Amino acid sequence: MKVKENLTAVRKEIPARVKLIAVSKTKPVSMIMEAYEAGQRLFGENKAQELSEKYPQLPKDIRWHFIGHLQTNKVKYIAPFVAMIHSADSLKLLREINKQAVKNNRTIDCLLEFHIAEEASKFGLSLPEAEEILSDPLFQSLQNIRICGVMGMATYTDDTAQIHREFSRLREIFNALKTGYFSNKPEFKEISMGMSGDYKIAIEEGSTMVRIGSKIFGARGR
Ligand SMILES: *Cc1c(COP(=O)(O)O)cnc(C)c1O
């Protein structure tokens, strides 16, 4: 795979206001270094163990974004260094992230993951579930996490109208939370949506962060 060429081609299609997370899951350190040498600094991984194995082998100015489903017992492996966790989907997980952040004497940036796909199978919160968390005094006492926005995945489909609807729903959720809970929080500004197959639609719908893997690093085995 020509990682550098792929990266250049993808960057041309992304406006400057949108951050590109290069999703390197399942890919070797050597390929990550190719992207690094082409100037890429934001990378995404979806398994805590894989990330914690890659981290020590790679330059320390990489900002690692955790994008996969995160079990509470795995938070400790990534808490010392992770730049942002995109997949916060319960109060229990947020409390554990906060606890591990305290242990590491840092604040961890998080996004709330929403279920926006019209299909049933994906992870994520509904708007009422998120509002319940945000109103909970237990959540409000967490001092070492910063909620920076929302994340979601659209259905894997050729139906572009459906993808537009789903991403537009995530933007509405973002707007509702911004108004209701984060109007005085400038850090609440991110909408993480868009992957290799649908990032152009996501950008049209207001994405601020796209998570692109196969279009940069090639198809994955799993
Ligand atoms: C794998 C993955 C991506 C990237 O997927 P591609 O289709 O390879 O671009 C983005 N977001 C999440 C949450 C992922 O797990």
Image (cartoon, rainbow, N blue to C red):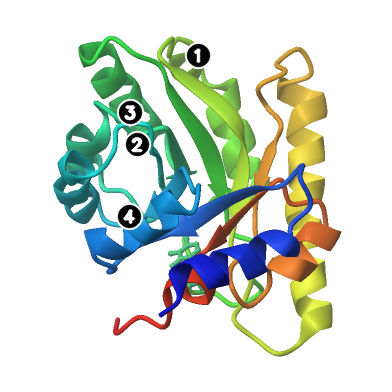
Residue for point 29% across, 68% down: 27
The answer to whether the residues at label 1 and label 2 have Cβ atoms under 8 Å apart is: no
Task: Find residue 215 and report its horizontal and vertical position in percent.
Answer: 54, 75
> Cβ of disc 4 within 8 Å of ligand 1?
no
Closer to the chain start, of discs 3 and 1, is 3
Residue for point 34% across, 13% down: 106
Dot 3 amino acid type: Ile
Q: CA distance from mark 3 to mark 1?
A: 17 Å
Q: CA distance from mark 3 to mark 2?
A: 6 Å
Question: Comparing marks 4 and 2, which lies closer to the viewer?
Answer: 4
Q: Is residue 166 visible?
A: no
Viewer-proximal residue, 42 or 89?
A: 42
On screen, residue 148 versus residue 73, left or right, reads right
Residue 97's mark? 3
Q: Within 10 angstroms of label 1, few (less than 14), some, or many (20 or more) residues?
A: few
Closer to the chain start, of discs 4 and 2, is 4
Closer to the chain start, of discs 4 and 3, is 4
Q: CA distance from mark 1 to mark 2?
A: 15 Å
Dot 2 amino acid type: Leu
Element on which disc 4 rests: helix
Q: Which residue is mark 2?
A: 93
Q: Which residue is mark 4?
A: 33
The answer to whether the residues at label 4 and label 3 have Cβ atoms under 8 Å apart is: no
Q: Which residue is mark 1?
A: 137
Q: CA distance from mark 4 to mark 2?
A: 31 Å
